Amino acid sequence: MHLTPRPYGLNNPEGVYFVTFTVVFWLDVFVRARYKEVFVQSLKYCITHKGLSLHAWCLMSSHAHLIISAQRPKKANLSDIIRDLKKFTAAQIIKEIEAGPESRQEWLLDKFRFAAGKNSRNTQYQFWQQNNHAEELLTNNFTYQKLQYIHQNPLQEGWVEEAYHYLYSSARDYSGLPGLVPITFID
């Protein structure tokens, strides 16, 4: 039986990928500093302990864009890293929501519970959409396009006037400023 590769997939273990993690129903969860901090600390942990190479990132209110690969020579499995990152951040952010204070606590938990009810893989809550829309970056032009797209997101939303002003993005690193998460620059 011949299997055709999925249009969005992590088919090349040596590849560099553009991925998007989206909260179910595009809920604006990352409007609280403590939820953003969970995501930032989780990225740092995956870089240090799981073999993630983070080349670019931007955390928006309902989603995150990343350019990632597996560290070499660790031979880390990128699918496993993504699974663990999403599972951990989901559990931690839901704990934070439950612990409060969160003015939208009941509403958010109800939405996560509803999403879980539609997915046999989840028991109580589903935080992230399952698909990551992984796209392998095969050309310099496509890589540059995705890098610009990631860094321009906060400008498109009108949050900042310059990409490097946004704290939750690698645009700071690419502008020579210290960022929140260590990155591996794209050549």
Image (cartoon, rainbow, N blue to C red):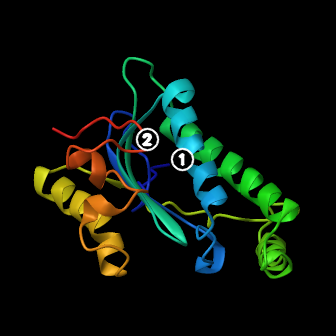
Q: Who is closer to the viewer here, 39 or 103?
A: 103
Please tell me whether mark 2 sits on a helix, a strand or a loop: loop
Q: Badge 1, how many Cα within 10 Å: few under 14, some, many 20+? A: some
Q: Is residue 163 shown to the viewer in this render?
A: yes
Q: Residue at x 20, y 49 (%)?
A: 175
Q: Badge 2, how many Cα within 10 Å: few under 14, some, many 20+? A: many
Q: Residue at x 33, y 71 (%)?
A: 153
Residue 182 marker: none
Q: Which residue is mark 1?
A: 40
**Distance from label 2 to label 1 (Cα)?**
7 Å
Q: Are marks 2 and 1 in contact (CB under 8 Å)?
A: yes
Q: Is residue 104 above or below residue 173?
A: below
Q: Is residue 60 left or right of residue 107?
A: left
Quadrant for the C terminus, please: top left
Q: Is residue 152 left or right of residue 140?
A: right
Q: Which residue is mark 2?
A: 181
Spot occupied by residue 159 in the image (x, y as percentages of width and height) = 38, 76
Q: Which image quarter: residue 71?
A: top left
Q: Residue at x 21, y 41 (%)?
A: 186
Q: Residue at x 82, y 75 (%)?
A: 105
Residue type, label 1: Val
